Amino acid sequence: MSIPFQLNGRPVSFDGPEDTPLLWVVREHFGLTGSKFGCGIGMCGACTMHVDGAASRTCVLAVGNVRGRAIRTIEGVAAEADNAVRKAWNDLDVPQCGYCQSGMIMTATAMLADTPSPTDQDIDRWMTNLCRCATYVRIRQAIHAAARSLKS
Amino acid sequence: MKGVTRSVGPSLGRRRFLEVAAAFGALLAVPLDPAVAAKGDADADIELTDWIFIDAQGGVTLGLCQPEVGQGSYTALPAILAEELDADWPAVKVRWVMGRDAYKIQFRNEKPSQKEGASTSTTKFYARLRVAGAAAREVLVRAAAARWQVPVSDCATESGTVRNIRTGATLPYGALAAEAARLPLSSTPRLKTPAEFRLIGKALPRRDTAAKTDGSAKYGLDADVPGMLNAAIALSPTIGGWLVRINNEAEIRQQPGVRAIVRLDDGVIVVADRFWQALRAVQMLDATFSPGENGGLSTELIDRLAEAGLDAEIGVTALARGDAPRILGQNPDQVIESRFSVPHLAHAAMEPMNATVHVQPDRVDVWGSIQSTDASVAVISKISGVPEDKVHLHIGFLGGSFGGKIAPDFVAQAVRAAMAVGRPVKLIRTREMDIQHDHFRPNNKGRLRAVVDKDGYPVAVHARVCGQSLFATTRPNWLTKTPLGDYDESMVDGIYNQSYEIPNFHVDVIQTPLPIPVYFMRSVGSSAGVLFWESFITDLAHKAGIDQYHYRRHLLRNNPAALKVLDAVAAAASWDTPPPAGTARGIAFDTYHGRGGSFVTHVAEVVELVRKGDGWKVARVFCAIDAGLVVNHNTFVAQIQGGIGFSLTSALKSEITFSRGGAEQSNFTDYPLLSIGEMPEVVPIVVESDRPPQGVGEIMVAPLAPAISQALLHATGRRPDRMPFRPDVFKATA
Ligand code: FES
Ligand code: FES
C-alpha cells in the first residue's frame, strides 16, 4: 500500500509497511542521507525533520503517520538561497564532527519560526538535541545571530 | 623526521593515490567550490610530493592522511602545506590519502602506522608538511626560473602562481608542474619565518563547514555501494559469552527483506535489503548465549578488587624520589589521606560504529567511520585472506570518535557479513550495541597520602592507583618492566609526571585484571589521574588554610612556563578578587605529556559555580592553554569549548556499570550526554609560546573535574571523590 507525502516540496510515495520509521524511508528509499541515525529512540535529535513545519524525531515516527503531510529535511533547507540559520551556522563554524548538526539546524529553524526572538531559556527548552562534541556554545551564538538577521 | 623524498615507486604510489581519490572523491570532496570539484580530471594530476598533486589547469590537491573526526585536521593540515607552497588556499582541493610511509607515524615502540590519535595530527605532521610544501614550492620556482631564464631570486610566489619580480610576468603552478616534477626535491628547503605566515596562526574558517550544514558531508553511515545489503548485529550480552543457538531462525528468515543470518562466535548478524528491515529482524531475534566465564562480573566485584589493591602492602613502583614510604611510616598521625574513584566510560560518539565492506577475490573495499587505518587494514586482510596492499579504505568524515573507532572489531564483523553473503554489506551498530560493546575507558581508584611541613606544603607523598590496565590489554609492549612486575604508566598519567615540587614522592600501581574490553579515550589516563592528583592538592591547601591558586603557585615556583599558564587563568578569572555571593570558584592545573614524550602542553582552568535554587550549577569555565604555536585559532578555540563540554559530560553523567557480566547502560537514557542548558560559558585563553605546535585535542579534559570538586568544597563544604558527581553533591548546604 502506497503512502503519499511531500518531501522537500516534491510529491513522493512510499510502498512499504506503515510502521517503517520515516528516517529510514527518507535515507534508504529516497536517498537523502543528511538526516542521521544517533539513538533510534527519540533521545538525540540527529534524525530531526520538519513535519508540516514542526520539528519531529523521525527515527520513532512511522511513515504511516505522515500520509499527505509536508516533510522537510536538511537538504530542503540547503536548497534555499540565503537561509539565515545555515548562514549563521556557517559564519560561526559551528560543526565539529558535524554529525548532529542537520538535526540541530532543523530544530533551531522550527524554534525560530515559533519564537523569533528566543531567550537563552527558550533555547534551553527547545534545543534538546544532543551533541557529543559539545558545540553548544556556538549553537547558542548561531541561534541568536540567525534570530537577529531574520528580524532585519 | 625524515626528509621529503619522492616515493620509491612513484608510479605505484601515484596509481594508488588516484584509485583511492577517485573512489573516495565523492565521499570527502567538499562542494565549497563546485567548479573545482567538477573539473576532477584526476589523471591529469602531477605529483610533486607525497602530499601535493597539481593538474594541468592548475588545480592543486592536497593530501590528508589523518581522518577528520571533528578536530579540524581537514583544515589545519592542508593549511600547513598550502602555507609553505603558497597555494591559492580557497581553491585547493583536499583528498584522503593512504598507504605510503610518509603518512605513517610512530607511537612509542610500535611499528610506524597510519592512524589518528593521541593529539598527534598537528604535532607529528607540522614539520613534515612544511618541508613538503616548501620543497614543492622550490621546484615550481626553479621550473619558472628556467622557463624565463632568470635566477630563482627573481621569482616570487603567491596564490598558486610564480611571479617574475622584474617583469611582473606570472606563471600558474599548473603550467609549471610537469617541469617541476622532473626536478629533485630538497630535503631542507627554506621554510617561511613566522612573520611570513598568511595561514598558520590565523583563525581560518573550516573547509568542511558548508558540507556539514547542508547534509552533503558523507559519513561512514552514508556509504552507498551498488548492490549493497544492510546489516544489524546482536552481540552476546555477556563479555566473552558465545552464541549457543538461534531459537527462531525460521521466523527471522521470513521477515521482509531478510537475506541471511550470519553466525559469529559471539553474536548474530542479520543481513537484509534495507537497514530498517535488518533492525526489525534483529529486534525479534531470540538467541541463546552462554555467559562463558564472566557471568559473575559486576561493578560491586570490580570495586572490591580495586579497593583491596589500594590497601595492599606493596604495588609496582612507577616513581620513587626521596623516601616517601619511610617518612609516611614514621609519622602515622600526621598523614593526610584521600581516596578517589572513577568508573568505566563509553566513548559514545554521535555516529554509531559502522562499516561497509565489499569483498572481491582480488580486493576488498571498506567505507566506514574508522580512526585507525593500518590496524583496520590488517584485520580486514586477515579475515578476508586478501593481501594488505589490496585492501582499500575509503574514510569520509567521522561522526566523532574520541578513541572509540580505533579498535576495529566492528569492521571485522562487517567483513564477515560481506563474505557470508558475497555482496557488499553495510553493518550499522545500533546505539545499544555501540555502547554495550564499546571498548571502555578503564576504571581506576586512587589513594593519596601525604605528610606536610609546618607551612602545609607536602614533604612526602605516596600515590597509589589501582584498576584495570589499558596497556595490558591493548599494548602489552608499552608496559614498563620493573623487578617487581610490569606497570602501565597510563594508570598514573598526570601523577607520575606531575609538575609540583615534592621532595619525597612515591607512585605505585596495582593492576586488577578484568575481562572487560578497554581502549584509549580522549585524554586517556589523565582523566582519572589528574582528578586524583589535583583533588588531593586541593585537600592539602584546604587543610593548610592557603588559597588554592597561591598554594599551586608555590609548588610551581621554579617552573616559569607552568606559572605563566596558571597566572593567565587566574588573571582572566579575577581570582584574587573574592567572588560575589552565590558564586564559588575552583582552580586546577595540569601539564599534559604526550605519550613517549611527543609533546608538552600546559593547561589551567577555573570553574565558577553559581547558586541556582537549592543547588549549584557549573556556569563558567576559564581555560588557559600553552600548546606552543597555534596553527588554527578558530578550531583551537572550538576544541577548548567542545572539550570542556565533553569533560563536563563525564564529570556529571557518565558511568558504565556491569552486572551479570555485561554493561548495564545501552542508550542515551541511561548513558546521558550533556544538554545545551547544562553547557557553561567558556572563556578560552590562548597562551602563545614560540614552541612548535603541541597537542591540543585532549588537554582541556582532565583539569575540569578537580576544579569542579574544589569549587564544590568552597560552595558546600564537601569535596566529592567519586566520578561522576551526581546531583546530590551539587545541593546547597545552607
Ligand atoms: S536518532 Fe532519532 S532521536 Fe536519536
Ligand atoms: S558536532 Fe559532533 S556530535 Fe555535534
Image (cartoon, rainbow, N blue to C red):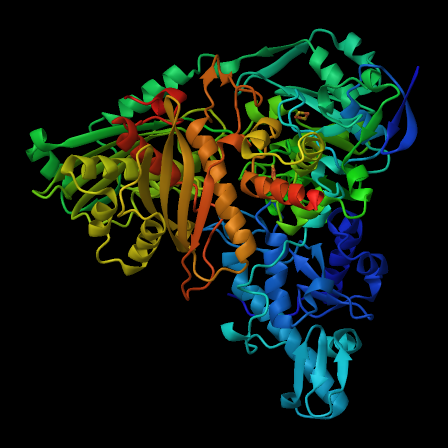
The reply, left or right, for residue B23 in relation to residue B623 is: right
With respect to residue B408, does B567 lie above or below?
Answer: below
Which quadrant of the figure contains the N terminus of chain A? top right
Q: Which residue is drawn at 66% across and 64% down?
A: B50
With respect to residue B378, does B597 lie above or below?
Answer: below
B624 or B15: which is nearer to us? B624
| Quarter holding residue B268 | top right
Q: Can residue B261 be seen in this view?
A: no
Instruction: Residue at the far front: name it.
Output: A152
The reply, left or right, for residue B74 in relation to residue B611 is: right
Count of numbered badges drawn on the protein: 0
B550 or B51: which is nearer to us? B550
B154 or B519: which is nearer to us? B154
- In percent of width and height, residue A83 lies at 75, 44
- In percent of width and height, residue B484 lies at 26, 37
The reply, left or right, for residue B680 in relation to residue A104 is: left
With respect to residue B54, does B21 lie above or below?
Answer: above
| Quarter holding residue B509 | top left
The reply, left or right, for residue B274 in relation to residue B691 is: right
- In percent of width and height, residue B562 lies at 31, 55
- In percent of width and height, residue B173 lies at 75, 75
Q: Residue at x 61, y 68 (%)?
A: B83
| Quarter holding residue B145 | bottom right
Q: Can residue B610 be seen in this view?
A: yes
> Within the displayed image, which quadrant is ligand 2 positioned in?
top right
